[in-house]
């Protein structure tokens, strides 16, 4: 049943963190200490991401600028435009704070690991996917705070300086990433001997942030604000939104004349949003805001996109190998 639903161990642990935060939320001084540990784990995670990324793959992928331009347009133009257009429908359905979370999800960069993995399974342009997804995450460290400042925090009546947030994100995410790239010749061989270390930090840091975010949200009365019907409507909204994006990501590259391998890379990189970078960014951008409500849409969207992309990638893999 779990295989059928594409519920891996990480997804189950995410659910466990939400349940644990509901039953035993961390608060007070313990929450402050937990926040410092979480921040350190996120910095180590992005250092490992920088050390893991192959420069050769990046250089090869950079040559295909048309592919990256289209993925960029999907990620930072189409997603936000559709999210803003959906406001008159979503605010009455979900409420203002959950809509902010939904819109924040639209402003996030693409995923890295899963975009590359799904493109590889589907026998698409892996080098292009590596470069496009990585570029999306690096650029997103600057674009996402600006979009959030204009379209979310500008409406929330809280003072917000995007420059300060960009500096914080640069120090927490980009600097460790660049440091990892610089030190890659010295640390990559050790990472190959311990292949699970990136996965542990990747998943572990997200789980820690989710637990901390939902703990503070539960203390603030999250589950009194989000009913079962609201949760159902959020899942429905994410599903419909993903369907629209995926249909466009499927047909637009065909109309533009991209080859089959490039179409697959564009589809997987252009239709997905990152939980790994999104949750740490939310922690910086939404200080004093209802963080649990903000990250709930991306958590739900993330699981739906993994389930759907897994099915499509396997279908295309069988199609390419002549098994269909």
Image (cartoon, helix red, strand yellow):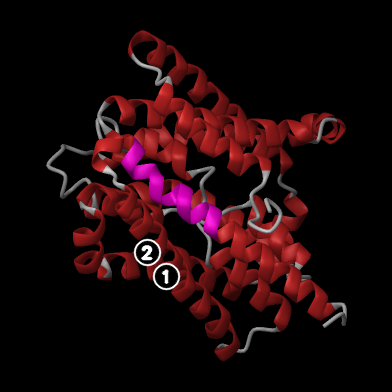
Q: Which residue is mark 2?
A: 237
Circle 2 residues within 10 Å: few <14, some 14–19, many ≥20: many
**In the rendered view, does 172 fall on the left or right side of 232?**
right
> Looking at the rendering, in which quadrant would you find the C terminus?
bottom right
Residue at left offset 20%, top offset 51%: 96
* Magenta residues, start to end: 292-304
Q: Please say whether residue 218 is visible from this viewpoint.
A: yes
Q: Which residue is mark 1?
A: 240
Residue 240 percent coordinates (x, y): 42, 70
Q: Are marks 2 and 1 in contact (CB under 8 Å)?
A: yes
Q: Is residue 189 above or below residue 72?
A: above
Q: Is residue 80 above or below residue 6?
A: below
Residue 16 among those drawn in magenta: no
Question: What is the distance, in whole Å, between disc 2 and disc 1 at their CAs?
Answer: 5 Å
Residue at left offset 45%, top offset 46%: 141
Residue at left offset 21%, top offset 52%: 95
Residue 205 percent coordinates (x, y): 56, 30
Determine whether the residue tagged by mark 2 lies in a helix, strand or loop. helix
Q: How many marks?
A: 2
Residue in the foreground of this view, choosing between 231 and 55: 231
Q: Is residue 172 above or below residue 112?
A: above
Residue at left offset 49%, top offset 66%: 72
């Amino acid at each position: 049943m779990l295989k059928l639903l594409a519920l891996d161990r990480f997804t189950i642990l995410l659910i466990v963190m939400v349940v644990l935060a509901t039953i035993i939320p961390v608060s007070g001084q313990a929450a402050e200490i937990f926040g410092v540990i979480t921040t350190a784990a996120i910095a180590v995670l992005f250092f490992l991401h920088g050390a893991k990324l192959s420069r050769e793959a990046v250089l090869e992928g950079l040559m295909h600028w048309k592919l990256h331009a289209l993925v960029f347009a999907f990620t930072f133009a189409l997603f936000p435009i559709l999210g803003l257009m959906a406001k008159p429908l979503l605010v009455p359905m979900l409420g203002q704070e959950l809509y902010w979370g939904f819109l924040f999800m639209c402003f996030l960069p693409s995923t890295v690991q899963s975009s590359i993995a799904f493109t590889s399974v589907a026998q698409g342009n892996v080098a292009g996917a590596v470069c496009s997804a990585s570029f999306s995450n690096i650029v997103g460290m600057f674009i996402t705070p600006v979009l959030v400042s204009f379209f979310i925090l500008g409406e929330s009546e809280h003072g917000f300086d995007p420059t300060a947030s960009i500096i914080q994100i640069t120090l927490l995410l980009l600097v460790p990433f660049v440091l990892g790239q610089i030190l890659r010749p010295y640390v990559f061989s050790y990472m190959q001997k311990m292949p699970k270390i990136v996965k542990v930090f990747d998943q572990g840091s997200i789980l820690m942030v989710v637990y901390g975010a939902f703990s503070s949200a539960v203390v603030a009365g999250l589950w009194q604000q989000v009913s079962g019907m609201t949760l159902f409507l959020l899942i429905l909204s994410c599903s419909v939104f993903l369907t629209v994006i995926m249909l466009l990501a499927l047909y637009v590259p065909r109309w533009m004349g991209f080859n089959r391998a490039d179409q697959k890379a564009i589809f997987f990189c252009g239709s997905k949003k990152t939980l790994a970078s999104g949750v740490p960014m939310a922690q910086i951008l939404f200080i004093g805001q209802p963080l649990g409500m903000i990250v709930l849409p991306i958590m739900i969207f993330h699981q739906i996109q993994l389930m759907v992309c897994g099915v499509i990638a396997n279908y295309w893999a069988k199609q390419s190998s002549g098994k269909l």
